[in-house]
Image: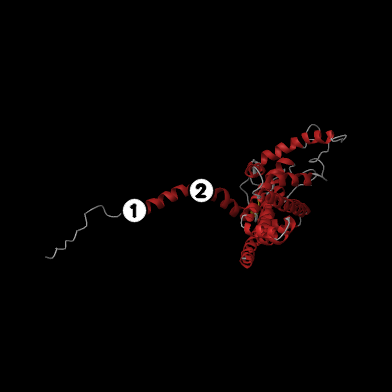
C-alpha cells in the first residue's frame, strides 16, 4: 500500500526584514561617523583648503580686508633668507634624528626580540612610554632638566667634575643637537615597534639552521637578518624622515626657535609669521605653509614608492 505524500505548506510568519535591518545599520554607521566627519572637515580639510586661498591674498588675520596678490606671497617667501635658513635647520634636524632613531632602535629591537631575554615585555613597555607622554609637557620638563643653574643635568655634570653648568638650550651651538636628542628619546619607541614587527617576519628556523652550522651573532645579522629586513628598512626610513618634519610642539616648548633662530624649523617659521609677529602676515605664512605641505607630500609619494619597492623585494626574497 502506497503511503500518501503530504506537502507541508509554509507557516505564515513575519516577512523578512533584511532590507530594513540593513538600512538601520547604515543609519547607525553614519550616525557614529558624522561627528568625526564634521570635526575632520572643520579642523583639517577646511584649514588646508583655506590656506591655499590665504596664500594668494594679503591679510593680517584680523581685519576683513583681503587684497588678492596672486603669487606675490610665494615670491616673498622664496626670497626670504630666513625661510631658507629654516629649511636648512629642518634638514639638519632630520639628519640628526633619523639615523639615530633607525639604527639605535634596530639594535634595541634585536635585543628585545630575543626569547631568552627575561621581562622583555616589560622592557618594551618602558621604552615605549615616552611616546604616549604629551610632547608639550616633555618640552616644558626638559627646560628644567637642562637648566644651567639648578637643573638635574647640570648637577650631574658638576658631580662628574664640571666647574659650571652648560646652557644646552640657550647656546646656539648646542640647542639644535639637544633638541634632536630629546626628540630621539621621545619617539624612539615608535621606530622600535616598527623593527619588532619586521623581526617577527624572519623565520626562526633560519637562525636555528645557521647556528647548527656554527654561525655567530655577527654572521646571523649579516647573512639572515639584514637581507630579510632590507625591504622594511626602506619603509621605516621614509616614515621616520617624514615624522621628523613635525617637531613643532616639542621645539616650540623647548626653545621657541631660539636662541638667535638656531632652532627655527619651518613649522616655527610659519607660526612666527602667522601669530607671533608684531603685525601678523597670514597670507605670507600660508604661502610658506603651502610650500612646506608640498614638500611633505613629495615625501609621502616617496613613501608610496618605497612600499611598492619593498613588496617587490619581499617577493623576490620569498
Q: Which residue lies under the disc numbered 1?
A: 20
Residue most extreme to the top:
150
Q: Is residue 110 visible?
A: yes
In percent of width and height, residue 104 lies at 73, 50
In percent of width and height, residue 296 lies at 66, 57
**Which numbered tag is attached to residue 36?**
2
Q: Quadrant of residue 207?
A: bottom right
Q: Nearer the viewer, mark 2 or mark 1?
A: 1
**SS for tag 2?**
helix
**Which numbered tag is attached to residue 283?**
none
Residue most extreme to the left:
1
Locate residue 258 relative to residue 284 in the image: left or right: right
In percent of width and height, residue 90 lies at 74, 52
Which quarter shows the N terminus? bottom left
In percent of width and height, residue 236 lies at 66, 56
- Upstream in the sequence, badge 2 or badge 1? 1
Amino acid at each position: 500500500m502506497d503511503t500518501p505524500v503530504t506537502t507541508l505548506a509554509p507557516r505564515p510568519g513575519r516577512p523578512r526584514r533584511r532590507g530594513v535591518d540593513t538600512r538601520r545599520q547604515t543609519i547607525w554607521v553614519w550616525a557614529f561617523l558624522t561627528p568625526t566627519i564634521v570635526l575632520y572637515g572643520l579642523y583639517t580639510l577646511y584649514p588646508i583648503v583655506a590656506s591655499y586661498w590665504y596664500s594668494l591674498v594679503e591679510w593680517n588675520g584680523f581685519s576683513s580686508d583681503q587684497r588678492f596678490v596672486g603669487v606675490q606671497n610665494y615670491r616673498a617667501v622664496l626670497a626670504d633668507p630666513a625661510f631658507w635658513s629654516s629649511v636648512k635647520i629642518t634638514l639638519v634636524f632630520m639628519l640628526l634624528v633619523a639615523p639615530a632613531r633607525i639604527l639605535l632602535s634596530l639594535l634595541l629591537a634585536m635585543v628585545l626580540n630575543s626569547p631568552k631575554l627575561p621581562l622583555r615585555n616589560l622592557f618594551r613597555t618602558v621604552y615605549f612610554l615616552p611616546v604616549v607622554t604629551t610632547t608639550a609637557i616633555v618640552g616644558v620638563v626638559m627646560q628644567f632638566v637642562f637648566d644651567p643653574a639648578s637643573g638635574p643635568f647640570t648637577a650631574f655634570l658638576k658631580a662628574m667634575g664640571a666647574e659650571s653648568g652648560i646652557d644646552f638650550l640657550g647656546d646656539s651651538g648646542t640647542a639644535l643637537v639637544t633638541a634632536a636628542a630629546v626628540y630621539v628619546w621621545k619617539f624612539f619607541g615608535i621606530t622600535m615597534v616598527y623593527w619588532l614587527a619586521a623581526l617577527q617576519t624572519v623565520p626562526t628556523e633560519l637562525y636555528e639552521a645557521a647556528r647548527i652550522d656554527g654561525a655567530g651573532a655577527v654572521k646571523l645579522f649579516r647573512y639572515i637578518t639584514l637581507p630579510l629586513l632590507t625591504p622594511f628598512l626602506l619603509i621605516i626610513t621614509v616614515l621616520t624622515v617624514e615624522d621628523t618634519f613635525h617637531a613643532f610642539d616639542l621645539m616650540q616648548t623647548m626653545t621657541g626657535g631660539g636662541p638667535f633662530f638656531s632652532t627655527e624649523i619651518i613649522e616655527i617659521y610659519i607660526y612666527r609669521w602667522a601669530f607671533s609677529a608684531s603685525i601678523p602676515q597670514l597670507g605670507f605664512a600660508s604661502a610658506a605653509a603651502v610650500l612646506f605641505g608640498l614638500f611633505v607630500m613629495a615625501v609621502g609619494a616617496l613613501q608610496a614608492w618605497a612600499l611598492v619597492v619593498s613588496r617587490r623585494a619581499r617577493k623576490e626574497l620569498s
